[in-house]
Image: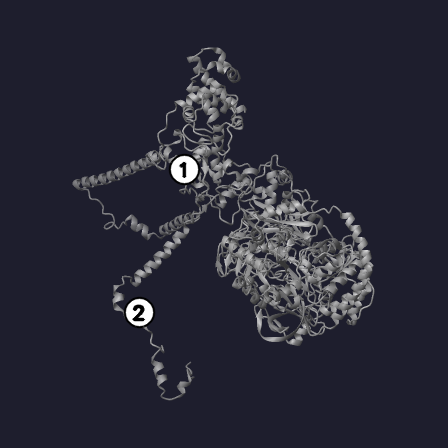
Amino acid sequence: MSSNKKYWKSVEELKENSSIVETLKQNEFVNEIPTDEFLANKATLESSSTTRRDFLKYVGFSTAAASLAACEGPVVKSIPYVVQPDRIIPGVANYYATTIADGFDFASVLVKTREGRPIKIENNTLAKTLGTANARVNASVLGLYDSKRVKGPKKAGAPISWSQFDAEVSKKLSNIASSGKTIVLFTQTYASPSTTKLIADFKSKYGNVHHIQYDAVSQSAALDAYQAMYGERAMANYDLSKASTIVSIGADFLGDWQGGGFDAGYAKGRVPHHGKMSRHIQFESNLSLAGANADKRVPLTPSQQKIALAKLYSYIVGGSVSGDLPKPIAEVVRKTASELKRAGSKGVVLTGIQDVNAQTVVLKINEALSSKAFDKATPILTRQGNDKAVSRLVSEMKSGRIGGVIMSGVNPAYTLPNASEFTEALKKIDLSVCFSMKADETALASEYLGAAPHALESWGDVELTKDHFGLIQPTIRPLFDTRQFQEALLKWSGNPASINDYIKAVWNENILNGSSFNKALHDGVFVRKAILDEENKTVAAINEEEDIQGLTNASGNAARALASSGANAKGMELTLYTKIGMGDGQQANNPWLQEFPDPITRTSWDNYLLVSKADAERLKLINENEATGALNGSYAKITANGKTLKVPVIIQPGQAKGTVALALGYGRKAGVKDELKTGVNAYTLYHNFNTVQSVSIAKDAGMHEFACVQLQNTLMGRGDILKETTLEVFNTKDKEHWNAVPKVSLNHQETPVTSPDVDLWDEFDRSIGHHFNLSIDLNACTGCGACVIACHAENNVPVVGKEEIRRSRDMHWLRIDRYYSSEDTFEQDDAKKDGFSGLSGDNGSLGGFGELEDPAHNPQVAFQPVMCQHCNHAPCETVCPVAATAHGRQGQNHMAYNRCVGTRYCANNCPYKVRRFNWFLYNGNDEFDYHMNDDLGRMVINPDVTVRSRGVMEKCSMCIQKTQKTILDAKRDGRVIKDGEFQTACSSACGNGAMAFGDVNDKHSKVAKLLKEDRMYHLLESVGTKPNVQYHVKVRNTKA
Amino acid sequence: MKKSYQILEVNLTNNMKQVIHRKLGSNILRIGLIFLLAFSTSLTAQDGDAAKGKSLFNANCASCHKLNKKMTGPALANVETRLSEAQGLDREWLYKWIKNSAGMIKSGDAYANKIYKEYNGTAMTAFPQLSNGDIDNILAYTAEVKVPPTGGDGGGGLVSQTPSAADNGSTNKLILGALALLFALLAAALVLVNKTLRRFAEEKGVAIAKEAGETGRKSLWQAFVQNQFLILVTAIFLLLASGYFVYGYFMQVGVNQGYEPVQPIHYSHRIHAGDNGIDCKYCHSSARVSKHSGIPSLNVCMNCHKSIYEVAESTATEEYSKEFYDGEIKKLYDAVGWDDANQKYTGVTKPVKWVRIHNLPDFAYFNHSQHVSVAGIECQTCHGPVEEMEIMYQHAPLTMGWCINCHRETNVKVKDNAYYTKIHEQLSKKYGVDQLTAAQMGGLECGKCHY
């Protein structure tokens, strides 16, 4: 059928006799194709001997040749040592004990090295204090192989030799010393006895030397308060395993509060034992790890927290304080006080409010409770920074009184709120030296850049807590032409000794007291026995008694001051916090940490403003999901003290109304790969080193793209996924009530799913040999994520980048799901879901499930680590068309990468969604510019685990390389394997005891006992997959 | 100690025979070492017996001294003359020095201290058991030796290449050639016979039936072409055959059995493991405890090659001359930075880039210690007759099928291994066998080798 429609091609056609229309009708191309350019030159064409046919022949030949050549195996060269070191056996790992002490993280660790390369950080079980590595410490090994590291000393950006560096710097130092100006050593907290002595030596050589210690995230208030009370500049130490009632006011003690390391003790008390577990009450503004684990969490603005703390003080110690709290909160504070009083010496109060009064008040409350958890014998020494000294430094630099600044371990040009002022002042100073691993913000502003070694290439020592020492030893010869700060000090003080000899001398003289240095070096830790322990104690006790009267008055004043400072807050209150993944930002160029999803927001590659739902609605800030599911958020403009930042917003359940929070440590600009320059620098708002700032917030244009790995935030009333109960029910009712095995109907008979009668598969006899089980105690898991990074390091898990995460292509073998309750508690969620009747209507499931997707304002939170469950009846195995995934007798679900053809059926059939597909070749691919695309970064790869290629599935292997090694070692020694020898990367990284791994066929093993516990359940048991990962019901110590 | 005594004994008994013939002819000397040592002074003349001296030298001195070459200690050719001429020291000094060098150094003897310092404070072992007579014999031996010809530098490479190695191959070719000739002759004979027969027929007027044209009979070829069934069968046969060869071709891609690359140093396993019987695990020590067998580091080579700077004449073969082998040892010295003339390490090293022969793919995990230490498998089981290999090559195909076969057939060595006690008891009951194979123990599971 022909059509009479006329299609208009342009307006021009309306005009009759338009010449253009005519012209265009004839010419297909508007502009003449310039064929002349390449065809006109006849001479060239004729002289060329390559015809079209020849060309095709060449193409064909080279293709054939290339494909034939590809069949030929490459020639691999093997280069043995010329002189093989005694200790190195290729293929066998060596472990060295050392300490990570970067000024923010302090931990005693073991470093696993293969063929001389450090490849993994593990916990040092000999350490009595700070012996567990958190996510950042676990990831720090990758920092050693950072391609952004400075490879040699520099002057004004140009490389120079160390000898020239020394000559110029010492000359300038002598000049400054003779001119009478001050030399400032501006360093991180080293807490190092040898460095302290070194600095004293340096002072005696150059005279007017001033040492300023600087913590990027200040703990000055806590230090000042402790110093005022106990005369020692330290932070109070708490052993939370000894507390039955823990009250925290704004202290994220499971995160980075006071340097961290409290979670192991906390977790110990959280596992119900003889019907008892500790109770944890948290008052805070933004949802922290500690708050997420609390039995009762009260969202309060920072100023309200001050009043609450003051009231708590008045209830427990006495005296009266002014200040008003909303009635329900005042009631909670009163009840908390009475709970604390009842707990007596088993109660403890912690606070993270950076205010001397608040810190003093807390110390006094703990004194009044005579809290057993308050460990006065071993205060924490890993923060020494002094805010006042740091603030004075900039003004003194400007005044010209300072002749030279030598910096090490600090990055003030990034971390100071008045960084630009500092940078300007620094440029005018005669001598500015910065020891740094990277050409970071401060290094770029300094004249001399001393290339510093990584912690794993350095010598050192550290007094972690009083009398508890750690030694730092190199685990690899320095990769580059670097020198540590201490070595430079030695040199400039004219001491020819080497740094390790110096440390050894200091230790033999002051610390070891006759013990062996080699033993201390082997252990990595040393505890000094105070000889006059007993005497000291009695003296201290007497002093305390004398002081107590005075202090009560003083601290009573402190409480009143605290309350009144809390009363006069106005505007929105911003809390600056640190994320467990990024800390103070010195590891910003670490792709593992950038990709590590924050335990609370489950968002990686960013920092963001956390806003409560109510405030978000008021300010019209939104979060929404794209068609792909990826999370987007509005931008907000925050203004404080005349500074403005544009930050993306995440609406955070549990955020106290009227408060917002922003993580420090992001927004690095220098010494960081482009892909990793993420987030905004919140330090610019860190005015007066106060983590709480009053700000004004307004919506800004545009939407930000987040990389969030968990898009479903609530459990939707499916309490069988993450089972939990209350302590009361746990103690009084039997298992059937709170941890029932799901039942299915078989011939109208209710049959438990564990029964073989309802199983699709035949049971395999697993009683012979080893049968591995991994147990996860949801009560002890704090969600800290150390296991995630440990798994990353052990199993060569690739980093995929922000864009890929947005497409849900994250590769983490182990994820920690975080769930919010939609009602006030998960229990109410379950009840609500069970109460649905019909599809629509008031009680209908359509609307009801919609509501259940929404987290509550102050939800209950629960964490659940999920990795491959190694099902005995695995759904993935039955659907693989090429049998690439198969079951082993030892209970592990094997994955043969070389056999996989990438159908992804297994991932689709996995009920736990733990299988990961390699969409790209991440190794050696410059599109993924993280660490696997350069030889340096690849040095961290574990040689025992295959690096997967494109197009194959991968997943948790239950660290089969580790279990196989344990078995082989035992076979070689001809012995039976003891319980505890079997470990996975995650279970050995878990310092909280939440993860246990072992052989359930060994009846005496820990996991075999855990398997029989009442709290044990399997994830999605109703599916009948019979997993080899056990979970243990979370018990909450809630009270009405 | 015992061993050295035995050697001494042998040497001395040898000497004794000569002594008997030449000097005393007494039977009393036949009772062995200690006796001989006790009485030896009476047996020797001042000038000494060079033959006896040689065996004494080899037994006692040769580990540190060579006659014409500086080693741990100085070269000893004509040592007595050299000392008396250059230092004015007599034989008495030598007696004292040999019997107790440390004492001499302590006593402050000038030349003793000089020597001590010259050799980096390496003290000479004291030989109190040597009598003056023995020493005389040794000195006689050292005096007897001629100054050596200035040695060739040994860089000479292949000197003679005889066809002997190819012997086997050539006989085969010969046989094949003969067969081919035979067939050619036969064919020619057939043609001739045919021709002759035709001629006869023509002459006798017998009409030869024309094959195709006249009688309507088709030629064999045409019949074949027209028979569809035959064509089908042939096509299937050809397809199968080509499929077989294509499959065969693809299956050998990446299988490097027989791979025998040229190495930067011609290291002969035949000499080391075969002729000298050095245990494999002496050099490949990490095979006992590690997944890698390890290529020995050069310091392991130098454990022996510090004193073995040349091969014996008898080591040379027709294919590889002594000079060639000595040249290879020089390459080692060059790589490890050993200055053989001054017996010192120069500190300049050039690590050897060996060509790796056994290449397992990255996704296959293999652990030597499991097989070597736990299972007690001989290295030769997988690596072939290494002790006969002049040039190392890959003996086994190293394919998965090859691994699996062995796991199916090999019994697990469970004896005296407490690890296996329980699992062996349970599994052997389950399978009803006495001996479990590696496969029954779980050695066929994917995840045991692929992770």
Q: Element type at marker 1?
A: helix
User: What residue type is disc 2 on?
Assistant: Phe
- Left or right? Give the position of A304 relative to A190: right
Q: Is residue A138 above or below residue A309?
A: above
Where is the C terminus of chain A found, in terms of image quarters?
bottom right
**Residue A331: x and y, percent?**
80, 68
Q: Chain of mark 2?
A: A
User: What residue type is disc 1 on?
Assistant: Lys
Residue for badge 1: B330
In the picture as drawn, the residue positioned furthest to the bottom comes out as: A16
Q: Nearer the viewer, residue A220 or B186?
A: A220
Q: Is residue B48 above or below residue B114?
A: above
Q: Is residue A752 above or below residue B396?
A: below
Crowd band around label 2 with a 10 angstrom C-alpha radius: few (<14), some (14–19), many (20+): few
The answer to whether residue B394 of the structure is visible from this angle is: no
Where is the N terminus of chain A found, in terms of image quarters?
bottom left
The answer to whether residue B235 of the structure is visible from this angle is: yes
Task: Check chain identity for marks 2 and 1: say if they share one.
Answer: no
Q: Nearer the viewer, residue A770 or A617?
A: A617
**Residue A133: x and y, percent?**
64, 53
Disc 2 to disc 1, C-alpha distance = 62 Å
Q: Chain of mark 1?
A: B
Q: Nearer the viewer, mark 2 or mark 1?
A: 1
**Residue B133: x and y, percent?**
47, 18
Residue for badge 2: A38
